[in-house]
């Protein structure tokens, strides 16, 4: 009894939602009670039982009408209608499995492509670093100086003098040799300031972190903090690792702790193996110094803004410090202005091209979804036309136009949700694969694009918006429906098809135009990549092997370096099959580069602002230019006599000669000055080439110096052979092992080493190729739908034409002429848009241009083949019509 009493105390609206059967039973009982009372009243007036019941029903305006009024009074009638609409929509879609499958697949392609691209955008750009107070964390850059080129003394001044940050941290990336007592292995680390973990607000998983009080000058903090992943994979979760001493580049370091599992560093795409203090930089990378302000190298400075400080205020504060440093260290610092950006890919150095690339992909993915919506809009308009008689009958029976529109929108939303679910499923699978993908095997790089709630929310929003977009197409058609005329005329459509432009025609033109742009973009990307691989780089990577010798990991330094470099070069040259070999500090387009400020020989004030050019600098042995097959245009190459006791000489490229001396002919024999004032004579002019890790770079000035006059510990050997150099790798490794068994070396072909420089072009080509393929599929379905619908609606007309003796080509022209015209119009519009977008396309892929005649011919051929493929089945159906059977059916 208590439970029954509690049930009746629940408000009627709530009970009608969750206990509908019980509430309906109560309503029937209540109305039956009132009907009986009314019947008794009329019986008392002398009416017969039948007449009394009829009079009671009339007095109550009928039981059905009373029920509807009672249901509406509950205030949940719209929910019941929505449920009915969903059930009706599911029944309608189940009756048309072909249409439903095509619609769901079409939308899945569009939403899936957008979900994948947004997942990349979310993971690389929008997602903050996984550290406390990440919203206040900013990166400090120097515009115009490769963004993150800094000197350690400048960082110290910024850290100690600023009033806008709680504290500034710094980090850089290095590769070292780690010796745990077994064979030495190469490992990647972050060189970090000793306040790194404290300022980020992190707590160790095991042991402790190093702190600012551990620092007492250069090389004073030989400590290591392992990442959790490296501790798990290389130390097997051994908790006794804390306090263990290991060797980095032959120097002892003590493991003091393990970082938390969720922290993998402050550069999103690069996961280090461990962290060491920046003050021990010279033990990790002997070629770099912490002392001089002119010693600039790439490291990043980060900091948390203080509460209430705006980024603009912080920039002004940093620029005031920069002015102080300019005045006090004019020769070393030059112009010092700063900007702030979010950590990760938000800065200009690496972030701008990645942001532009992902934004371009997002735009193209949006076009894919727009084409899908246009495709579905056309299908829905055709479907609404086929259901005109059904709509007319429902209107004639009293259904409101709003109710009919609501059912159409419900069908559209159901399709969009199903398409969104399928697209999201595939996008989650693809993003999961991308999340564990290592694009460059040599580096611990990964793409952090694991899907999260943001990706799911965007996919849901796109599904709903898409459903509304293509669901709104037949609205005007329904609102203008005249039930009397349609019921009177039967199922035949009125009007002469093909004589006026319809909404379906416009949607098809838009869809084909978008698809033509996507197809053209993919062809441009493929063509650009092919040109990139065949272009001249200023050297010949084919049949060349690169050997990196990590001398600093083996304990070599200073005066011992030239001798061991000579032994390594002699050992490699003695390998059978090697045609030439040479030394270089950093090969072009491989791992990194060094830059040097160059001054004219008449300049006496050697401040950075007075530099004639900043050139890419290489230190090479005399054999390098022939081994790299770099063409010497004029002058002479280096010789073994160009050593420390000889006058300083250099070989420069054409761009260097043009910028510093005005022309190539004027450069030979002329002098310029290095940043330390050393005068250097130009003895040769080499061809221009590509030098940094970006194959799409603008022409750069390059400077080649004799390695004997400018010694360096950075050691690469270029080994050229007459055939596949990979076959020589075992012999090369054996000879180098004979020189020093403990020397870590890394071998790869020069073409393989260029994977990083070609990475952007290759990813762009694959991405645009996939989007182009999706666009082609949408184009095929759109044209096929249009052609098939045209044939199905005109079968009687085509039958009459064939009965009267029409030729096959005339029948095809009548059946498919409109579809072919719309295909041609959309393709022409798309190719024109692709031409206008040439600058954007050229910015994505190196040497890509849509004005290439081969690209235009390929795009026209591709769209023609797509049209032929899409119209093939409708054409076969039109030609196989039997006019006798058609007329007999009529």
Image: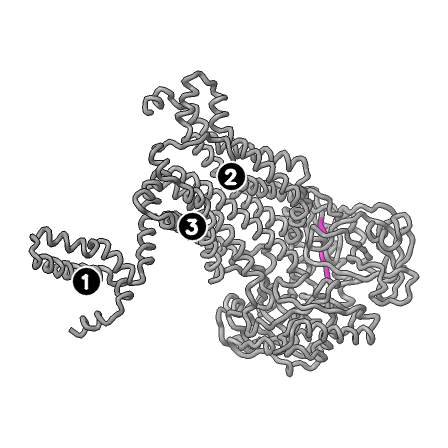
Q: Position of residue 302 (x, y in %)?
A: 65, 71
| SS of the residue under disc 2 | helix
Q: Position of residue 138 (x, y in %)?
A: 63, 70
The residue to which callout 1 is attached is 26
For this orientation, the residue located farthest to the top is 805
Mark 2 and mark 3 lie on one chain; the one further toward the N terminus is: 3
The residue to which callout 3 is attached is 416
Image quadrant in which you'd find residue 352:
bottom right
- For the residues labelled 2 and 3, the Cα–Cα distance comes to 19 Å
Q: Toward the viewer: 157 or 516?
A: 516
Q: Is residue 633 above or below residue 43?
A: above
Please, what is the dominant secondary structure of the magenta stretch? Answer: strand
Q: Is residue 375 left or right of residue 758?
A: left
Q: Is residue 17 above or below residue 718?
A: below
Q: Toward the viewer: 287 or 550?
A: 287
Q: Position of residue 765 (x, y in %)?
A: 60, 46
Image quadrant in which you'd find residue 105:
top left
| SS of the residue under disc 3 | helix
Q: Is residue 718 magenta?
A: yes
Viewer can see residue 635:
no
| SS of the residue under disc 1 | helix
10 Å crowding of disc 1: few (<14), some (14-19), many (20+): few
The residue to which callout 2 is attached is 508
Q: Is residue 648 left or right of residue 91?
A: right
Mark 2 and mark 1 lie on one chain; the one further toward the N terminus is: 1
Circle nearer the viewer, 3 or 1: 1
Image quadrant in which you'd find residue 264:
bottom right
Residue displayed at 87% across by 67% down: 606
10 Å crowding of disc 3: few (<14), some (14-19), many (20+): many
- For the residues labelled 3 and 1, the Cα–Cα distance comes to 38 Å
Please give the range of residues in magenta: 713-719
Circle nearer the viewer, 2 or 1: 1
């Amino acid at each position: 009894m208590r439970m029954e009493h509690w049930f009746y105390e629940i408000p009627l609206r709530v009970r009608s939602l969750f206990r509908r059967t019980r509430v309906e039973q109560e309503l029937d009982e209540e109305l039956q009670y009132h009907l009986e009372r009314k019947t008794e009243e009329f019986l008392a007036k002398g009416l017969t039982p039948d007449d009394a019941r009829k009079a009671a029903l009339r007095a109550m305006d009928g039981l059905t009408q009373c029920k509807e009024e009672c249901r509406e009074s509950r205030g949940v009638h719209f929910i019941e209608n929505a449920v009915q609409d969903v059930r009706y929509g599911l029944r309608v879609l189940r009756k048309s499995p072909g249409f439903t499958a095509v619609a769901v697949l079409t939308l899945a392609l569009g939403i899936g492509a957008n979900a994948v691209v947004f997942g990349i955008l979310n993971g690389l750009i929008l997602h903050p670093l996984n550290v406390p107070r990440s919203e206040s964390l900013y990166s400090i850059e120097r515009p115009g100086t490769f963004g993150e080129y800094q000197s350690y003394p400048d960082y110290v001044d910024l850290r100690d003098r600023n009033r806008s940050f709680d504290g500034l941290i710094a980090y850089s990336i290095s590769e070292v040799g780690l010796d745990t007592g077994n064979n030495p292995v190469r490992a990647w680390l972050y060189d970090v300031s000793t306040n790194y973990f404290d300022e980020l607000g992190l707590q160790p998983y095991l042991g402790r972190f190093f702190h600012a009080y551990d620092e007492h000058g250069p090389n004073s903090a030989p400590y290591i903090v392992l990442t959790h992943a490296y501790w798990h994979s290389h130390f097997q979760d051994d908790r006794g690792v804390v306090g263990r001493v290991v060797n980095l580049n032959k120097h002892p370091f003590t493991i003091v702790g393990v970082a938390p599992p969720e922290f993998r560093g402050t550069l999103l795409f690069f996961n280090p193996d461990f962290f060491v203090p920046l003050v021990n930089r010279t033990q990790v990378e002997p070629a770099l110094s912490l002392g001089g302000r002119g010693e600039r190298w790439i490291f990043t400075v980060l900091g948390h803004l203080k509460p209430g400080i705006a980024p603009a205020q912080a920039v002004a504060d940093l620029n005031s410090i920069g002015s102080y440093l300019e005045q006090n260290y004019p020769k070393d610092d030059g112009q010092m202005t700063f900007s702030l950006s979010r950590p990760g890919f938000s800065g200009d150095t690496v972030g701008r091209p990645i942001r532009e690339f992902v934004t371009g992909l997002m735009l193209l993915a949006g076009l894919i979804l727009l084409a899908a919506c246009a495709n579905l809009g056309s299908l829905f308009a055709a479907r609404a036309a086929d259901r005109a008689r059904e709509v007319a009958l429902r209107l004639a029976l009293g259904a409101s136009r709003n109710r009919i529109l609501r059912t159409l929108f419900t069908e559209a939303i159901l399709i969009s949700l199903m398409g969104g679910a399928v697209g999201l499923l595939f996008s989650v699978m693809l993003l999961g694969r991308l999340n564990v993908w290592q694009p460059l095997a040599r580096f611990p790089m990964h793409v952090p694009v694991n899907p999260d709630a943001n990706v799911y929310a965007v996919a849901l929003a796109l599904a709903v918006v898409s459903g509304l977009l293509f669901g709104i197409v037949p609205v005007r058609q329904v609102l203008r429906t005249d039930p009397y005329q349609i019921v009177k005329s039967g199922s035949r459509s009125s009007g002469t098809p093909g004589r006026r432009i319809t909404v379906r025609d416009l949607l098809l033109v838009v869809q084909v135009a978008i698809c033509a742009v996507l197809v053209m973009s993919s062809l441009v990307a493929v063509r650009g990549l092919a040109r990139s691989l065949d272009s001249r780089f200023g050297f010949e990577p084919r049949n060349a092997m690169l050997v990196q010798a990590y001398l600093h990991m083996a304990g070599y330094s200073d005066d011992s370096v030239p001798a061991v470099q000579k032994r390594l070069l002699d050992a490699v040259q003695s390998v059978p099959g090697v045609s030439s070999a040479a030394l270089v500090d950093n090969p072009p387009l491989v791992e990194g580069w060094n830059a040097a400020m160059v001054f004219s020989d008449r300049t006496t004030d050697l401040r950075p602002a007075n530099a004639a050019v900043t050139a890419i600098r290489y230190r090479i042995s005399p054999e390098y230019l022939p081994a790299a097959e770099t063409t010497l245009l004029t002058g002479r190459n280096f010789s073994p006599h160009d050593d420390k006791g000889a006058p300083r000489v250099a070989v420069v490229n054409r761009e260097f000669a043009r910028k510093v001396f005005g022309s190539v002919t004027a450069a030979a024999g002329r002098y310029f000055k290095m940043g330390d004032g050393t005068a250097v004579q130009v003895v040769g002019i080499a061809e221009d080439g590509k030098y940094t890790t970006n194959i799409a770079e603008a022409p750069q000035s390059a400077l080649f110096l004799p390695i004997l006059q400018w010694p360096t510990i950075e050691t690469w050997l270029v080994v050229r052979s007459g055939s596949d150099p990979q076959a020589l790798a075992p012999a090369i490794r054996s000879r180098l092992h004979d020189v020093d068994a403990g020397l870590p070396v890394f071998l790869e072909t020069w073409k393989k080493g260029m994977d990083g420089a070609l990475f952007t072009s290759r990813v762009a080509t694959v991405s645009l190729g996939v989007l182009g393929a999706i666009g082609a599929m949408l184009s095929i379905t759109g044209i096929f739908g249009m052609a098939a619908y045209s044939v199905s609606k005109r079968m009687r007309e085509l039958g009459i034409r064939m009965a009267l003796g029409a030729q096959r080509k005339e029948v095809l022209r009548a059946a498919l002429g409109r579809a072919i015209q719309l295909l041609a119009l959309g393709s022409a519009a798309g190719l024109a848009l692709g031409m206008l977008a040439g600058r954007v396309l050229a910015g994505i892929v190196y040497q890509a241009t849509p004005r290439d005649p081969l690209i235009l011919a390929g795009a026209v051929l591709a769209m023609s083949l797509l049209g032929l493929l899409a119209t093939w089945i409708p054409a076969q159906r039109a030609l196989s019509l039997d006019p006798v059977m058609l007329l007999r059916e009529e």
